Image (tube, rainbow, N blue to C red):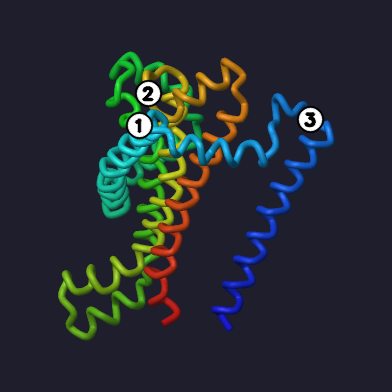
Amino acid sequence: MPMRADRMVLLAQAAVVLGLFLAWEAVSRLGLADPRLLPPPSLVLPKAAELLGDATFRGHLWITIKEVALAVVIAAPLGVGIGLALAESPYLGRAFKPFFHFVAAVPKSVFLPVFILLFGIGFGQKVAFGVFQALFVLVIATAAAVAAVPDELVRLARANGATRRQIWVEIHWNAMLPLILEGLRLGMIFNIAGVIFAEMYVSRAGLGQRFSTWGESFRMPELFAGVLIAAALSIIVNETLRALERRAGAWRTG
């Protein structure tokens, strides 16, 4: 039954995507929108394949992938570590949790000029801004994950003579991991968006730089094709982490 439900969900999602593409094609072909500004998918999809076959574009894409990957390698342990510290220490939690919640609610784009002044316009600035975008989501998710650990399981394990390490590995980590992965998944969305936005603002290379150039020169087929490629990569990352999240949470219902 669950397998059948999963297939039905996938079919429904595919139908929604197909419907959106058909509507997009109709809007452009029927003149409801200027096709010079909204080129139809029948033009954009072949352009996406053409871009993926172009070595120069793949170079820009690879730069963005490296920036995003390095940002998450830095942000993940840093965000989880800070979140654990805030959750485990009542003093640190009271002192600094409001700060993280406040900054998390502020649009991070307003801080980009500061990052440009601090790091310049090179590779490091994009990575730093990606870390900044993802960090606050990870901190908040980790702090929430600690609070979600079932107290009754911890007490039961202690009553049965479990060591502190066993309690941490078998109970705390298993209970926290799904929420941490959820925070990482959301953090990756902010990370990717932050890196591409930083590249659009001022950069010599990367997907964002290509988007900015195509937009300024009204090369709309290339712009929409690039956006579809970036969206596809984001969906792959998101769904991979979602699958890991479901697998990590299976012990709750197993």
Instruction: State the SS at label 1.
Output: helix
Most distant residue in the top direction? 117
Task: Decide which of 112, 33 is in the foreground and name it.
Answer: 33
Is the residue 61 above or below the residue 1 in the image? above
Neighbourhood count class around disc 2 (C-alpha, 10 Å): few under 14, some 14–19, many 20 upward: some
Task: Decide which of 215, 155 is in the foreground and name it.
Answer: 215
Quadrant (top left/top right/bottom left/bottom right) for the C terminus: bottom left
Q: Quadrant of residue 249?
A: bottom left
Q: Amino acid at mark 1?
A: Gly
Quadrant (top left/top right/bottom left/bottom right) for the N terminus: bottom right
Callouts 2 and 3 close, C-beta under 8 Å? no
Task: Decide which of 168, 96 is in the foreground and name it.
Answer: 168
Is the residue 180 above or below the residue 8 in the image? above
Q: Quadrant of residue 10?
A: bottom right
Write down the residue under mark 2. Answer: 205
Write down the residue under mark 3. Answer: 33
Residue 33 lies, in percent from the top left, at: 79, 30
Neighbourhood count class around disc 1 (C-alpha, 10 Å): few under 14, some 14–19, many 20 upward: some
What residue is drawn where x is 23% and y is 83%? 159
The tag earlier along the polypeptide, 2 or 3, is 3
Callouts 2 and 1 close, C-beta under 8 Å? yes
Instruction: State the SS at label 3.
Output: loop
Instruction: State the SS at label 2.
Output: loop
What residue is drawn where x is 41% and y is 59%? 179
